[in-house]
Image (cartoon, helix red, strand yellow):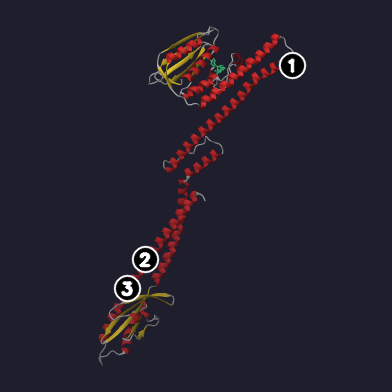
Amino acid sequence: MKFSLKLLLSTVMVLAAALGFTGYFFVNYVFETSLSREARQALDENSILRFAFETAALNVPTKYDVLQDHTLEQIASNLETSGQRTGRLLRLSGEEKNVLYASEGFEADSALLLQAEENVRSWQVIFLSGRYYVQTVSGLHAMDRMLYLETLRDVSEVFEERELGFVVYRRVTVLMLALGACIMHFIASVLTRPIRQLKKATKRMAAGEYGYRAKRLSADELGQLTRDFNRMAQALEENMKELEAQVQDREDFVAAFAHELKTPLTSIIGYADMLRSRRLDEEKSFLSANYIYTEGKRLEAMSLRLLDIIVTKRQKVEFQTVSVQLLFDYLQEMFTAREDMEFLFSCEEAMVSMEANLIKTVLINLVDNACKASEEHGRVAVTGKREDAGYRFAVQDHGVGIEREEISKITKAFYMVDKSRARSKNGAGLGLALCVEILALHGSRLKIESETGKGSRFSFVLPMAEREAV
Ligand code: ADP
């Protein structure tokens, strides 16, 4: 069942119960008040009749000092006829509670009379031939006689009014319920709008529309729920995109890896086949064997690089405090042996926090790439400088440069801008991917600035160390 319907039904039920109870108590209260007013009036009437009876009895000539039964009957009859217009009904009984006189139609039983006491007035409601009456009884003294006077007062109107009250109230209740249900239906649909919005958003997200957001319609708890839901949807969408990108990267990696394997293997198989199927002269045999050897070496280098990347990804770095000067001395010693290039090493001395061997790998890769991109005897500058954010290492060349749209791709595994040129220089497109992994372990990123034809600058920042050098 819909939440708005539940809300509507429960409100209507509470409203019906409230109206029912109030109506019942209200109509009954009016009835009780009217009935006790009628009873009071009946008792007053009884008192007046009693007084009139006693006065009439006093005026009777007292021949024998005793009031005869027929005299009493006469007085009672006179009293009855004097109130004929009001339909007065009375009954007179003697000391022994024996009936002396009763109006026509006074059919009440003697239950009230039997309980009657001398100085107590009492009353009760009775139902006689389809009508309701208040029956009263009181004792009276007429000369030497103790008598009981009963009256009947028709109070059917009070009961009819109660019935009418119930009927009217029932109609009012039904009307109020119908009106209340309409109003509540409107309120429930307004109140549950945010829930419908959330439901719609969930459905669309379940159908794969991760960018869909629920409209926030209020600032209350439901509004907060919508906001939290949207935040969750946002996080979910970002995670999904990240996962999709990761899957795409993995697929690209596998495709590139297969391709990179295929190229050297084709050469190896081709040359090996030539060696085994034909008799070649010594020079051709050497050339074939040499191709097999160099391509095999390239495969070996590639698998070692891949291993490096995988190991680096899983590695936990143990940071050391390293003197930049010592690091630069090491690099200078390594590269100055190369006579085909011109190197410039310059650094500000500082203590930097790093895993020295890994950072050496990064710098060697960057310098290697700079050499590959440069003309013979081109100049490669390796610099180190303090900055606000830390210590910046940079490798700059004046080589071929990289096109703007290629810059974001070259750090991906196996990506080479010019494949034949890269392969001819023993490249496999894995060097920068390894650099990026190593820098990520250090919490740093590779910054690439380049202009085609003018050269490139690869740099990264490492944190300065607070401790002394090891
Ligand atoms: P590799 O050098 O083994 O080919 P890398 O991952 O180190 O692989 O580099 C990827 C590609 O990025 C290279 O093939 C080259 O096209 C480009 N590249 C890297 N460094 C430079 C540079 N300094 N100048 C121009 N292109 C570069």
The residue carrying mark 1 is 277
Q: Residues within 10 Å of mark 3 (few under 14, many from 20)?
A: some
* Amino acid type at image mark 1: Ser
Closer to the eye: label 1 or 2: 1
Residue 264 horizontal/vertical position (percent): 64, 18
Q: Secondary structure at mark 1?
A: helix
The residue carrying mark 3 is 41
Residue 418 located left or right of residue 4: right
Q: Nearer the viewer, residue 366 or 166?
A: 366
Residue 396 horizontal/vertical position (percent): 49, 13
Q: Are marks 3 and 2 in contact (CB under 8 Å)?
A: no
Residue 233 horizontal/vertical position (percent): 49, 36
Q: Quadrant of residue 53?
A: bottom left
Q: Nearer the viewer, residue 50 or 369?
A: 369
Dot 3 or dot 2, earlier in sequence: 2
Whole-number angstrom distance, CA of label 1 to CA of label 2: 123 Å
The C terminus lies in quadrant: top left
* Amino acid type at image mark 3: Gln
Q: Nearer the viewer, residue 424 or 446?
A: 424
Closer to the eye: label 3 or 2: 2
Q: Residues within 10 Å of mark 1 (few under 14, many from 20)?
A: few
Up-down relation of residue 428 to residue 284 (above or below): below
Mark 1 C-beta to ligand 1 under 8 Å? no
Dot 3 or dot 1, earlier in sequence: 3
The residue carrying mark 2 is 30
Residue 466 horizontal/vertical position (percent): 38, 21
Q: Secondary structure at mark 3?
A: helix
Whole-number angstrom distance, CA of label 3 to CA of label 2: 17 Å
Q: Quadrant of residue 13?
A: bottom left
Q: Are marks 1 and 2 in contact (CB under 8 Å)?
A: no
What's the residue at 63%, 24% (across, down)?
258
Q: Secondary structure at mark 2?
A: helix
